[in-house]
Amino acid sequence: MRTNLVWRSILAGSIIIIAFLYSIPTFLAEDSSLRKILPQKEIKLGLDLRGGVHLTIGVDVASTVKTTLSMLSGEIRNTARDEKIIILRPELTSGDIITLTLLDSASKDAFQSLLVKDFPMLEVVDERSLTSVAANKSITYSLKLSDTYKKELEQKTLDQAVKTIRNRIDQFGVAEPDIRAQEGFRIQIQLPGLQDTGRALDVIKQTAHLEFKSVDEKADPTRAIAPLGREIAMQAITLTDGTVQERPIVLYKDVLMTGEYISDARVQFNPDTREPEVLVTFNKRGATIFERITTENLQKQIAIVLDGKVHSAPVVQAVLSDHAVISGGFTDREASDLALVLRAGALPAPVEVLEQRAVGPTLGQESIDSGVRAAVFGLLGILIFMLVYYRMSGFIADIVLILNIVLLLAGLALFSSRSCKKWI
């Protein structure tokens, strides 16, 4: 019996000592020497008390639908070619419709079987969209995403955007971020204690939507209107004096590959120009796709498009599989931030800041001071009343109350997020 009491006393005493050690750092000054020997945990304050940034971001899921259809149109063409089925280059028309022409009506059954087997997410718009042309025996198809697949794609895009933004913020070390999806394809973000707001917003808002597209080297980029199935984009060219100039370039609209297959991204320096560039590495599936792309476009230009802007359009000199290099007059900080967002994952769709509010810490500090004063006076009042009215029983109750508060504070500090001295 006595042995059990001793062990219980030791256990209780140990817990109380640990609780006191974890409670003290919250009340110490930033430059206190005691912080070197005490636990590094402390209670993290929320946006209402610490100040910070509140954002509401809208996700453009419609662009993801169009990008998916563009990639599917290219996959349909390649798969049909492997099956010896001849079709004209599929085109993405208004209303998110893929239009293509089957040149030989005798291949109709084989082509429809191909759609059912390899592209179950696509469906024929209606029977009127199948038009037989007797002169050349061709059939024109109009295809769209099924409603079920489209809804799943939109929800997946929103979920992926939330996950990507959370990964980016975690790499910066912001404590206790509140990131949640809302109706209408919106995301609410609260970043307590954030100081370098500008850079954080740039990283959060940067889509880092990477695409690879073929370059139409024969088209005239100075024309006001691009040829059918093409588009005019702007390419960043670094001149000999170090300045960056934008020039038009004609691209095919079909997307050869996107950045969703990136497994890693890091900064390196070009051995000739000594300028920073970003080396991206693809996963296994991405390597297979990129190898096919470089094989088909050997000695041709492939544009590397980031957020709608062409950063480079190199000529494919050899077949590549697992990596690509993004260059284009980056500063060290821009290259570092780009590698960060690509590593954390590119946003699956462009985003737009719908609401931005900065909460100042002045009001929060006033609330903290008022709360501390109220807690101290209230606690003293209770302790004195209990001691005067109940005497010894009140004294014991006062000790238990104090220990309860200490354990509560220690628990809040112990289970708080990692310290974020860099941002607070």
Image (cartoon, grey):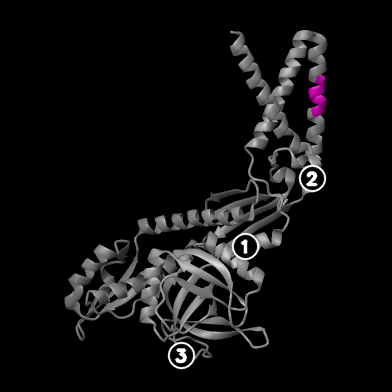
Taking 95 as reference, is 391 above or below it?
Answer: above
Reply yes or no: does residue 107 show up in magenta: no
Q: SS for tag 3?
A: loop
Residue 51 vs residue 301, the one in the foreground = 301
| Marking on residue 203 | 1
Q: How far apart are the two marked residues, 1 and 2, measured between alpha carbons?
A: 28 Å
Q: CA distance from mark 3 to mark 2?
A: 63 Å
Question: Mark 1 Cα within 10 Å, few/some/many (few <14, many 20+)?
Answer: some
Identify whether 152 is placed above or below 44. Answer: below
Query: Where does the N terminus fall, quadrant-wise?
Result: top right
When asked about the image quadrant of residue 372, the answer is: top right
7 to 178, vertically: above or below: above
Residue at the spot x=70%, y=54% of the render? 357
Magenta-drawn stretch, dominant element (helix, strand or loop): helix
Three-letter amino acid code at the position of disc 1: Val
Provide the residue designation for mark 3.
219
Contact flag, marks 1 and 2 (Cβ < 8 Å): no
**Residue 177: horizontal and vertical position, in percent?**
62, 48
Mark 3 belongs to which amino acid?
Ala
Discs 3/2, front: 2
User: Can you give x and y, in whole percent of width and height, for residue 257 in the image?
Assistant: 42, 71
- Distance of mark 3 from mark 1, alpha carbons? 35 Å
Farthest residue in the front direction? Answer: 3
Task: Name the element at disc 1.
Answer: helix
Numbered range of the magenta stretch = 376-381
Q: For residue 30, which numbered disc appears in the image? A: 2
Residue 212, image x and y in percent?
46, 75
- Is the residue 228 above or below the residue 54 in the image? below
